[in-house]
Image (tube, helix red, strand yellow):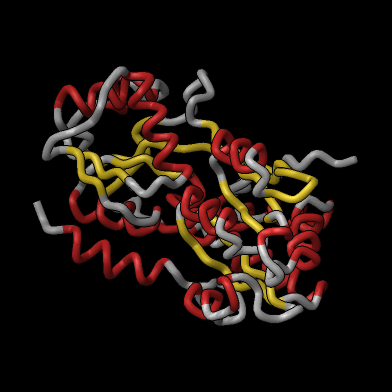
Amino acid sequence: MKNWKLMCLILGVGLLCGCSSGENANDAGDSADGASGGKEDIILATTTSTQDSGLLDVILPVFEEESGYTVSVVSVGSGEAMTMGENGEADVLLVHSPVAEEKFVEEGHADEDGRMDVMYNDFVLIGPKDDPAGISAEYPADAVAAFRTIADTQTEFISRSDESGTHKKELEIWDACGITPEGSWYVEAGTGMGAVLEMANEELAYTLSDRATWLNLELDEDLTIVCENDESGILYNQYGVICVNPDKNEQINHEGAKAFQQWIVSDEGQELIGEYGVEEYGKALFTPNALQE
């Protein structure tokens, strides 16, 4: 087994890159209390899947041009993004861990509008094309059985292990199996989705991914989807947008955060999301589902 600790550290640094206006997480963090340092700046804390999928590269320039705001993106796991919100270190969140998001709102960390649905896609189980655990043949649409088979055969599985929405979904599936994964076959990477998929590709291991990041990275020479479209709904992947409570500190750019929230659930924002991926993949990578008044 390779020593992934050093690799994860190196890759983790790369994940903290802003995908808009050339800014990065460290630039955002230089502002007072980690929140926006300028009236026209917004700090968006978001899951790595929205960046690794390429979606933000498409939608943020449109929002910036139309609104006049500059968005600094901090791309981390959903859990870490919400911790930033709790600490008043971000203005707005775009995350995909609905249970944790509701808790975030209930505990008073959001503004008066709480969370709003934005879009959804699904998770897929990725594995080597030779599929040593035999999942694609036996359990192509049964995530619980597929995970149980990986554990029973102790076939290498790489977990994000970063409190992200993907990690929480993975733990949900293990819990449904009645299994606590442990042992040398279970690799805890502690890094983002793109980095984990690269690791799985090098190790020819299994991992859980959101479909959009998997398609965008094009690692299908050696890897493939071995389980998907589980009719139980356990692989469903909902995203939400939340404005951080402006009472956290004076640096919170609530006006800018609200502008972004309202734009991404607007007809225009939703249309852009629904178009992303259609030209290249023949279908949208995310399905917009914001509730319109």
Give how far across and how far down residue 39 sits, in percent: 76, 79
Q: Residue at x 57, y 68 (%)?
A: 73
In this picture, is 97 found above or below 3?
above
Extreme residue in the left direction: 1
Work out whether residue 195 or residue 201 is closer to the camera in this orientation and state it: 195
Task: Check the picture and name the quadrant holding the C terminus.
Answer: top right
Q: Residue at x 67, y 65 (%)?
A: 249
Query: Number of numbered discs present?
Result: 0
Work out whether residue 66 or residue 97 is closer to the camera in this orientation and state it: 97
Left or right side of 31 for 165? left
In this picture, is 165 found above or below 193?
above
Left or right side of 76 for 95? right
Work out whether residue 96 or residue 150 is closer to the camera in this orientation and state it: 96
Give how far across and how far down residue 142 sits, in percent: 39, 21
Give how far across and how far down residue 95 sits, in percent: 57, 49
In this picture, is 224 found above or below 46?
above
Q: Residue at x 69, y 53 (%)?
A: 273
Left or right side of 202 for 281? right
Extreme residue in the right direction: 293
Give how far across and how far down residue 98 sits, in percent: 59, 37
Work out whether residue 71 or residue 255 is closer to the camera in this orientation and state it: 255
Asked which quadrant contains residue 88, the reply is bottom right
In this picture, is 250 found above or below 183?
below
Asked which quadrant contains residue 138, the reply is top left
Q: Residue at x 53, y 23 (%)?
A: 233
